[in-house]
Image: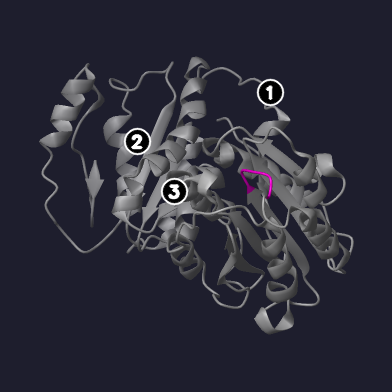
């Protein structure tokens, strides 16, 4: 279905039993511009009454709704969230995809959980392989739950499936991102997507979280400081505009710049707020390599808590030297860039459950198990 001022019923479940048939039906949909209004609440209300009827809905299959929008809801947001709540209570899983002018808070309010809410600054990016892969990454685990009948009691939820939120946490956060030749440009796009996913729950607009980014290869390049942007949409746009810089791996210089330039009062560092850096690299430094670990040690000595993420590393000795202690809680390793999205939850869990010892304002953990209804 599509919607503008009202929801519009288009293709039923029983329209075709083959993928090609479904594609053909979609191609025939008249998607001409219809109205300026965007009433997602009405569309969500129509979903259950028109599609998931007794004759069409299968009781043994999981019910999933994907809402795609490029605008803030023109009706009251409360109505949209209310309709989404009704769907979830009836056993639906909801994934939201926002593009351009979509409202991040509305996306999260409708989605079954925050990791099911996605944002893209453009339709071109939303159609990219990396973005689609990110959405599919959460859709697959949801789809696999179809073996569990909606009428039976679901199995226990394992700890790894917890939703973690840093709600209320004040944070000055700097990302230190490897942009060397070994990363490659497609993977660098995945890295930028990881940063945006990481910030999905961050209260940037409310002023609790400030964000800065520095990238590095032969040299380091500050993309924006902690006090450059005060709106999440502006931060996302700035991340999208970060260029890929090929070259060698000078992690030491990036760590020095992070400490001595970015975490300064002049560039937005707040003395009463925890300083946290997330360092992401796919290789051992090969410029100023002897300075890498000492630079990290100096940063930690000055009160910066460091989470280090390694991608495809065979040797994590340097990564261990960068991360704050204990290493097993603050150093993370994955095999390739496509695994970064899943890693996001583990890093946020560590971030929100561990209070850096050098600041006066503790960080709080709020966890809510994923609901199976």
Instruction: Name the element at disc 2.
Output: helix
Q: Residue 331 carries which label?
A: none
Instruction: Name the element at disc 1.
Output: loop
Image check: 10 left or right of 41? left
Residue 272's x, y, as percent?
Answer: 81, 75
Q: Residue at x 18, y 37 (%)?
A: 10
| Residue pointed to by mark 1 | 156
As drawn, 105 above or below 164: below
| Residue pointed to by mark 3 | 185
Q: Nearer the viewer, residue 135 or 110?
A: 135
Image check: 195 left or right of 106? right
Count neighbours of disc 3 (C-alpha within 10 A) and say few if under 14, some if 14 to 19, many if 20 or more: some
Residue 118's x, y, as percent?
Answer: 45, 49
Task: Identify the image quadrant of the N terminus.
Answer: top left
As drawn, 351 above or below 22: below
Residue 208's x, y, as percent?
Answer: 67, 70
Q: Are marks 3 and 2 in contact (CB under 8 Å)?
A: no
C-alpha span from label 1 to label 2: 27 Å
- Residue 323 visible in this rendered orientation of the protein: no
C-alpha span from label 3 to label 1: 41 Å
Image check: 281 left or right of 365? left
| Residue pointed to by mark 2 | 48
Q: Which residues are the magenta region?
A: 281-285
């Amino acid at each position: 279905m599509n919607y503008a001022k009202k929801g519009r019923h288009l293709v039923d479940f029983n329209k075709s039993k083959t993928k090609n048939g479904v594609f053909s039906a979609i191609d025939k949909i008249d998607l001409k511009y219809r109205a300026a209004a965007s009433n997602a609440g009405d569309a969500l209300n129509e979903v259950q009454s028109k599609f998931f009827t007794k004759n069409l809905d299968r009781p043994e299959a999981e019910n999933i709704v994907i809402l795609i929008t490029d605008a803030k809801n023109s009706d009251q947001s409360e109505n949209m969230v209310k309709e989404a709540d009704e769907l979830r209570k009836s056993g639906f899983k909801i994934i939201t995809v926002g593009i351009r002018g979509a409202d991040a808070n509305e996306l999260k309010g409708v989605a079954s959980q925050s990791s099911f809410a996605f944002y893209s600054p453009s339709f071109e990016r939303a159609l990219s392989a990396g973005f689609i892969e990110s959405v599919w990454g959460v859709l697959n685990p949801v789809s696999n739950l179809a073996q569990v009948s909606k009428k039976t009691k679901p199995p226990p939820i394992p700890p790894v499936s917890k939703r973690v939120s840093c709600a209320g946490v004040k944070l000055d956060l700097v990302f230190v991102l490897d942009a060397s030749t070994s990363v490659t440009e497609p993977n660098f796009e995945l890295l930028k997507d990881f940063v945006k996913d990481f910030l999905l729950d961050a209260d940037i607009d409310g002023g609790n979280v400030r964000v800065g980014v520095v990238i590095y290869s032969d040299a380091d390049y500050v993309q924006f400081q902690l006090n450059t942007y005060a709106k999440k949409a502006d931060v996302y746009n700035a991340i999208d505009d970060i260029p890929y810089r090929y070259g060698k791996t000078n992690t030491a210089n990036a760590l020095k710049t992070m400490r001595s330039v970015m975490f300064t009062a002049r560039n937005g560092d707040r003395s009463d707020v925890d300083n946290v850096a997330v360092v992401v690299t796919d290789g051992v430094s090969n410029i100023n390599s002897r300075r890498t670990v000492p630079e990290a040690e100096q940063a930690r000595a000055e009160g910066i808590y460091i989470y280090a993420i390694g991608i495809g590393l065979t040797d994590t000795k340097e990564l261990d030297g960068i991360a704050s202690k204990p290493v097993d809680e603050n150093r993370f390793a994955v095999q390739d860039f496509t695994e970064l999205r899943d890693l996001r939850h583990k890093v946020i869990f560590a971030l929100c459950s561990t209070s850096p010892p050098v600041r006066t304002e503790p960080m709080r953990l709020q966890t809510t198990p994923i609901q199976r209804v």
